[in-house]
Image: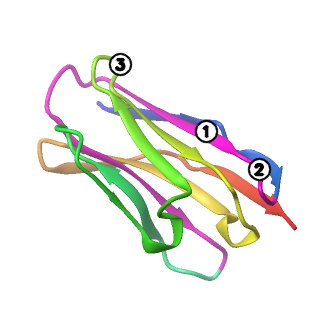
Amino acid sequence: QVQLVESGGGLVQAGGSLRLSCAASGASFGIRAMGWYRQAPEKQRELVAAITSGGNTNYADSVKGRFTISRDNAKNTVYLQMNTLKPEDTATYYCNVDLLGRPYWGQGTQVTVSS
């Protein structure tokens, strides 16, 4: 059973930075893409950034140039470095992992950006 443990959320002022981490346990092989989604109140969940096992990345237009996704395959961990945060980045951020074609989700971590 794969478990995803997220950390790094919190409250930050606009212009500040946060780093999210998501560690996947219970999977010794087979992790493909890893990514981060977010969901703000009354909005649909949206992709923020994703990274393949080979290191190719994809970002939402709204975060390009401000957020950076990376992964440590040896640790089965994905990171999201968030810089120049804006109030509109406020949301619950969810880690997502593709394990042999099956998606797994973290429990979510809250990011709140004050103006």
Question: As rendered, which of 60 and 4 lies closer to the eye?
Answer: 60
Is 53 contained in the magenta span? no
Instruction: Tell me where the magenta segment starts and ends, as one range.
Output: 14-41
**Is disc 1 placed on a helix, strand or loop?**
strand
Mark 3 crowd level (few <14, some 14–19, many ≥20, 10 Å Cα): few
Q: Nearer the viewer, mark 1 or mark 2?
A: 2
- Locate the N terminus by quadrant: top left
Q: Which mark is residue 75?
A: 3
Q: Earlier in the sequence, mark 3 or mark 1?
A: 1
Residue that badge 2 annotates: 16
Considering depth in this image, is 106 or 51 the residue closer to the camera? 51
Task: Report the Cα–Cα distance between label 1 and label 2.
Answer: 11 Å
Q: Which residue is mark 1?
A: 19
Counting residues from the start of the chain, the first of labels 2 and 3 encountered is 2
Q: Residue at x 31, y 32 (%)?
A: 2
* Figure coloring: rainbow
How far apart in space, not on screen, are marks 2 and 3 (Cα)? Answer: 27 Å
Give the answer, above or below, for where 84 lies relative to 34.
Answer: below
| Residue at x-position 63% and y-position 72% | 40
- Name the amino acid, label 1: Arg
For residue 42, side relative to residue 37 (left or right): right
Residue 16 in the magenta stretch? The answer is yes
Could you classify mark 1 by the number of other residues whose Cα lies within 10 Å: few (under 14), some (14-19), or many (20 or more)? some
Q: Main secondary structure of the magenta part?
A: strand
In the displayed structure image, the side of residue 9 where residue 6 appears, left or right: left
3D distance between C-alphas at marks 3 and 1 = 17 Å
Work out which residue is located at the far front of the displayed protein and give it: 65
